[in-house]
């Protein structure tokens, strides 16, 4: 919380600063940042979410091939692109963007870990878990592949998913790296906001 001391000091001789006031101050300082920093902070999560949507399509394609599903291409592709996109964007906003903009996330390591986890979970693990029931339902509906017996369902789906998970390792790694990179840049921008004073506004915008 050392960084928040800078905000408290700026508000008036160490007086306790309310959460609402900190958020307001950070928002004002955000507007003073260079345009490139504002765009990266605002639109960076969209790129991470876009990669998650693409990962969903990849996982969907793998399961369709394994289960010999040829029908319902649009039916399965739409949720596999949209849901990971929305989930990843919401997770990153909730765990990284909003805490930074409210002054609640002052640990650089914590920020990087959160970004990496959002990238891996939202852009890798979630698409795999989502693609399985979507395509299993289509396979059962169109009888494109033999379905497991009731007592053997868990083992069947685990064995079926192993090659998908192996193929998705690269995607998981890339999403984790991208999430880490994005969160590191966002934390740098946050630190830059903390250092802004009223006299810096013209210099930064110039």
Image (cartoon, rainbow, N blue to C red):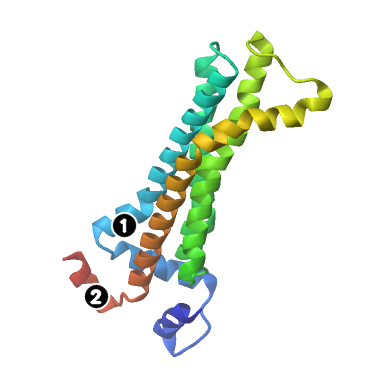
Position of the C terminus, as image quadrant, is bottom left
Who's the residue at 41% across and 70% down the image? 25
- Residue at the limit of the structure toward the right, as seen here: 151
> Considering the numbered disc 2 on the image, is that residue within a helix, a strand or a loop?
helix
Who's the residue at 49% across and 48% down the image? 119
Q: With 158 as the anchor, is 149 left or right in this view?
A: right
Who's the residue at 36% across and 61% down the image? 185
- Residue at the limit of the structure toward the left, as seen here: 206
Q: Which mark is residue 63?
A: none
Q: With 168 as the anchor, is 190 left or right in this view?
A: left
Residue under circle 2? 200
Residue closest to the eye, 125 or 204: 125
Query: How far apart in space, not on screen, are marks 2 and 1 (Cα)?
Result: 16 Å
Who's the residue at 53% across and 37% down the image? 166
Instruction: Answer above or below: position of 105 versus 77.
Output: below
> Considering the numbered disc 1 on the image, is that residue within a helix, a strand or a loop?
helix
Residue 206 seen in the current view: yes
Residue 93 seen in the current view: no
| Coordinates of residue 178 in the picture (x, y in percent) | 40, 50
Q: Which mark is residue 38?
A: 1
Pointer 2 local density, CA inside 10 Å: few below 14, some 14–19, many at least 20: some
Pointer 1 local density, CA inside 10 Å: few below 14, some 14–19, many at least 20: some
Q: With 8 as the anchor, is 35 left or right in this view?
A: left
Residue closest to the eye, 201 or 42: 42
Q: Which of marks 2 and 1 is in front?
A: 1
């Amino acid at each position: 919380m050392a960084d928040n001391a800078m905000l408290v000091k700026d508000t008036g001789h160490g007086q306790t600063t309310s959460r609402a006031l900190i958020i307001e101050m950070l928002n004002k300082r955000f507007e003073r940042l260079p345009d490139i920093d504002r765009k990266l902070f605002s639109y960076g999560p969209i790129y991470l979410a876009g990669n998650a949507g693409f990962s969903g399509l990849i996982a969907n394609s793998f399961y369709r091939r394994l289960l010999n599903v040829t029908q319902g291409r649009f039916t399965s592709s739409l949720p596999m692109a949209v849901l990971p996109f929305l989930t990843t964007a919401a997770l990153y906003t909730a765990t990284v963007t909003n805490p930074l903009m409210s002054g609640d996330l002052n640990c650089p390591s914590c920020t990087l870990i959160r970004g990496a986890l959002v990238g891996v979970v939202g852009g890798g693990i979630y698409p795999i878990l989502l693609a399985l029931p979507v395509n299993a339902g289509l396979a059962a509906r169109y009888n494109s592949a033999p379905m497991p017996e009731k007592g053997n369902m868990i083992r069947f789906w685990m064995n079926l998913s192993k090659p998908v998970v192996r193929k998705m390792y690269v995607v998981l790694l890339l999403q984790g790296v991208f999430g880490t990179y994005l969160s590191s840049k966002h934390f740098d921008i946050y630190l830059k906001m903390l250092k802004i004073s009223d006299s810096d506004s013209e210099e930064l915008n110039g």
